Image (cartoon, rainbow, N blue to C red):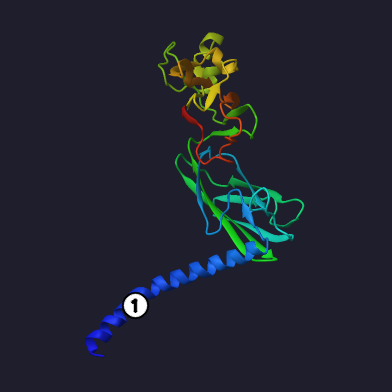
Amino acid sequence: MNRRRRIIILIMIILLLPLGITFSRYVIENIKNYLMEANNFFFNSDKLVEGGITYGINNWGGGTYIDIQFQLNNHKNNILTSDADIVYTVEADCDETKVTCVLSSESGVIQVAEKTDEFLLRVTPIVEFQDNQSISVTLTANATSPYEKELSATFVITVGRRGIDYEIRDEEWRAYLMFNVTNSLETIIAKEAFGTYAVGDPVTLTAYQALSAADKAKCASIIVTLSFDPADVILDTTSEIMKEATFHTRTYQGVSYIDQVTFAMDQLQSQEVRFYKRDISIDYSYPQTQSTPVITFSAIS
């Protein structure tokens, strides 16, 4: 074999070696998964996956804790479940100089009969976060017996509007969902012009308390806008917010429906808004179930 041919073969080996290693790992991993499933071992989650996954959560107000719910289970589908109890551990990794991360449980056993274990991760800020700032939290679950398997997920939690939190609470087969907004801001703005105030001007708490009832009604802490597709959800027009809300409509299947509603909220106030679902089999919970909310939120403060 001449020198040139040896060099060409050497180059091909160098180029193909990484592919061979990657392919070998792929084969080994698939063989391992096949053997575990052949022995009826299933260790899964509604959010964590083998190899990891990243979720974005953009509804955090940055001033209070945020909860992340997840579960671990021992089934592949409604029929196939593990034949043995699964021993596991769970851990949360986060920047402890900025937040505290507390798990409802850090270990356990999924019993054959129980099939699912529920968890809550509470992330609480210990420093001041501003709009658009983020914190990452990684959850890792390890099955240790009768087989080993690792599941993980990283949650990138971002402050949408500081001091304003929102969530969607829902469940499968329920006719409606609840959109909840919490405003922990103490700021006040003029939503209508009056006296010396123009629209959008800040009003101090002292000045606000001295206003007449009529002028107080022209002020708010935030102006919230909810946008949605009436093909998915329908606003409950008997809601308390509709007394003073403004709204936009569009036609869906020949009928006029509201697809955007805007309403004012006072400082340190929470508000619930009901929506009826077209498809009651869907759980629209956000951020617990859905990665993207079915209702878009925005606020002016």
Q: Is residue 97 visible?
A: no
Give coordinates of residue 179: x percent, y percent.
58, 29
Q: Residue at x 56, y 68 (%)?
A: 31
Q: Quadrant of the N terminus?
A: bottom left
Q: Residue at x 53, y 9 (%)?
A: 214
* Mark 1 secondary-structure assignment: helix
Relative to 282, does residue 278 appear above or below in the rendering?
A: above
Viewed as shown, does residue 162 lie left or right of 172? left
Q: Nearer the viewer, residue 260 or 268?
A: 260
Question: Could you say which quadrant of the image residue 176 lies in?
Answer: top right
Give coordinates of residue 41: x percent, y percent.
67, 61
Q: Nearer the viewer, residue 280 or 151?
A: 280
Relative to 85, does residue 46 appear above or below in the rendering?
A: above
Q: Is residue 237 visible?
A: yes
Relative to 150, does residue 286 appear above or below in the rendering?
A: above
Relative to 69, does residue 225 appear above or below in the rendering?
A: above
Q: Nearer the viewer, residue 203 or 29?
A: 29
Tell me the kind of residue under disc 1.
Ile
| Number of disc labels | 1
Q: Residue at x 56, y 25 (%)?
A: 267
Which residue does the numbered mark 1 point to in the structure image? 14
Give coordinates of residue 212: x percent, y percent.
54, 10
Q: Nearer the viewer, residue 78 or 234?
A: 78
Q: Residues within 10 Å of mark 1 (few under 14, many from 20)?
A: few
Give coordinates of residue 259: x percent, y percent.
47, 22
